[in-house]
Image (cartoon, grey):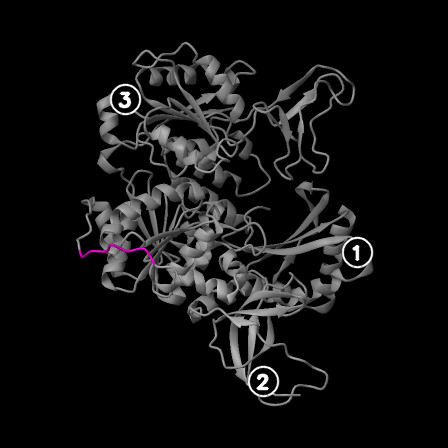
Amino acid sequence: MSIPSAIVHVALHTPSHSGVGDLLSYASAQPLPPGTLVRVPLGKREVLGVVWDAVDATGELPEGAAMRPIAGVLEGVAPLAPPWRRLVAFAARYYQRALGEVALAALPPQLRDLQPDQLARRLKRPAQAQGATEDAIQTIALTAEQESARARIASETGPFLLFGSTGSGKTEVYLRCVQEALEADPSAQALVMVPEINLTPQLEERFSTRFAPRFGSQAVVSLHSGMTNPQRLKSWLAAHSGAARIVLGTRMAVFASLPGLRIIVVDEEHDPSYKQQEGARYSARDLAIWRGREQGAKVLLGSATPSLESWHASDPAMGRYVRLAMPSRIGAGALARVRRVDMNQQPRRAIFSAPLLAAITERVARGEQSMVLLNRRGYAPVLHCADCGWKSDCPHCSAHQVFHKADRTLRCHHCGYTVRVPRACPTCGSPDIHSMGRGTEQLEEQLGALLSEVLRPDRTPARIARIDADTTKAKGSLEAQLAQVHAGEVDVLVGTQMIAKGHDFRRITLVAAVQPDGALFSSDFRAPERLFALLMQAAGRAGRDAAYMAAQGSQCEMWVQTFHPQHTVYEALRKHDYEAFAAQQLKEREEAAMPPFAYQALVRADARTQEVAQGFLTAATAAAHAAGLPGLEMVTLFPPVPLTIQRVANVERAQMLMESPSRAALQRFLAAWQPVLQTTRSAPEHKGLVRWLVDVDPLVI
């Protein structure tokens, strides 16, 4: 057997929990530096891999063993730097996933498909002229609060939690800190993350306007899943080469290859969208903190309603984060006055209370804009037969099919199954089927009827628009609809949480939440925190332009229609008192030994039957106790239970919760439990098991 000149260990995206191992060895005609992108054979396929480390050949291979050679090297792409590889390795280890799975998922999809010659042709295309100049960047004067925050960020190491009320100018602080980092070092790069794709266009416009005149039109790029594969590859290559100085993106951008990274900004850091919910279930916010510390980059978390984990970490007694407060709005603008409507005193089936409707009418008549929030799309959550009790249940999921009136369909929002609305009850034939509950589509229709006689100042009828996942499917539709709102072509905007955060609406003076009570009594202990954050963010959309409010001579308002007006969530909202709300929630969490005072993980099993799913988890628990796995003495394993939505696409789902006062103990146990879970899966009685996965630091329980 011949001796290869070099052996390279390559990270590949092998099947999850396949037992293949993190790295596979290949023969190379020459030594390759770690981080090199290569094409290698895997079975009958040829796939992309990352050289993780290389060793010189030291002798003959074992008898009968064969080492396959690499198929090619992606020339022209510099090796991925050690800090990037350390980030991927940490994420894979901490979130209990295969190294190759995390590494390859962090690369742009098109890079995984291109052959070396195809990539070479793409790299030969002439780059567009940058148009960079030495012009000074045009900035605006900072308020005293902004300047204080900027100065501390410049002089201290962080990480920083920028606790600023909505409209306090957090984005301007981000811009100034990024500017200082880029001007201090010609190779410096910045990473700015937002929770959702729909927030990237306005942020990109603002960053490009500020930095393109100085650093060139290609200095600011975006990275998110809404881009085409060629666009993502182009942005990734620009970041990897250092040509892009600023990368804007969603959670996936935390894995961007940025060799000159000096500052990371995580805007709306509390948002649950930063937690990946499929595959490797990482938290981009937490990885940003780790990456900044490991790579020597400053990390700035920003929010008007920080996550309780970040708020607790920024407590001076903890000393993990530096808390910077900006409580005042720009231009001395006032925060929205919160008005609660007790729906117990309103007609039983009223969607809009009389006082709220009068307030919206008054705003339309003055030429002002209003926003109505309901975090449920569609026309109604379910259709119902009054005679036999039939409901529009999904045949493949333990959930209802949502009624969409616009196209007369029943649609499952979990598996996508869609059918036409029946003319009569499928069970008893009764024509008396009607909708139960409400969605944004119904709110839009109801407002159209209620405001049909209301006129704007120019004597034209009131104009109502809806923004949710159903109205923004087409490419460019969201941008077009937002442009209409900004141009004043919409009087009342109806929507889901898509419109509640991040958008800088200048003419909205009234915001209303019509059915927020559902989260108050949820089994999820984080539900009150999420509701408070959503309502505070929504309230922040009103009255953002102090000059406009002064010219109108009116006060911005946040209306909340609720059956529980005295609930602590609404009391804190009325006072805009996040600190009191956080203190109360943290006290309850500490008494109950819940995060951030404990650490959690979930193991979920998907199977053909609920019995198999729970049986697998029960057996794996018994095996863990029998083996006496390390860390188990400090970990509590709870019995397996079905998920809230038990069945999706004909797959039954169960999960079990683990809790520990020690993060290290929980990590030791999970690492030792992985092979036990793999062995348990292969038992004959678990034949119907489809998959299992581990979720570390879960957000939904």
Assign a secondary structure to mark 1: loop
First in sequence: mark 2 vs mark 3: 2
Alpha carbon separation for disc pair 1 and 3: 66 Å
Q: In which quarter of the image is residue 399?
A: top right
Disc 3 marks a residue whose amino acid type is Ser
Disc 1 marks a residue whose amino acid type is Lys
The spot of residue 90 in percent (x, y) is 50, 66
Was residue 131 drawn as part of the magenta stretch in this picture?
Answer: yes
Total tally of numbered discs in the picture: 3
Residue under label 3: 554
Residues drawn in magenta? 127-134
**Residue 257 visible in the displayed image:** no
Q: Residue 687 shows which numbered tag?
A: 1
Disc 2 marks a residue whose amino acid type is Pro
Mark 2 vs mark 3: in front: 2
Mark 2 vs mark 1: in front: 2
- Residue at 38% across, 32% down: 482
Q: Residues within 10 Å of mark 2 (few under 14, many from 20)?
A: many
Assign a secondary structure to mark 2: loop
Q: Residue 4 shows which numbered tag?
A: 2
Q: Quadrant of residue 679?
A: bottom right
Q: Quadrant of residue 258?
A: bottom left
Was residue 455 drawn as part of the magenta stretch in this picture?
Answer: no
Name, please, the residue furthest toward the right: 684
Alpha carbon separation for disc pair 2 and 3: 79 Å
Does residue 415 appear left or right of residue 113 in this picture? right
First in sequence: mark 2 vs mark 1: 2
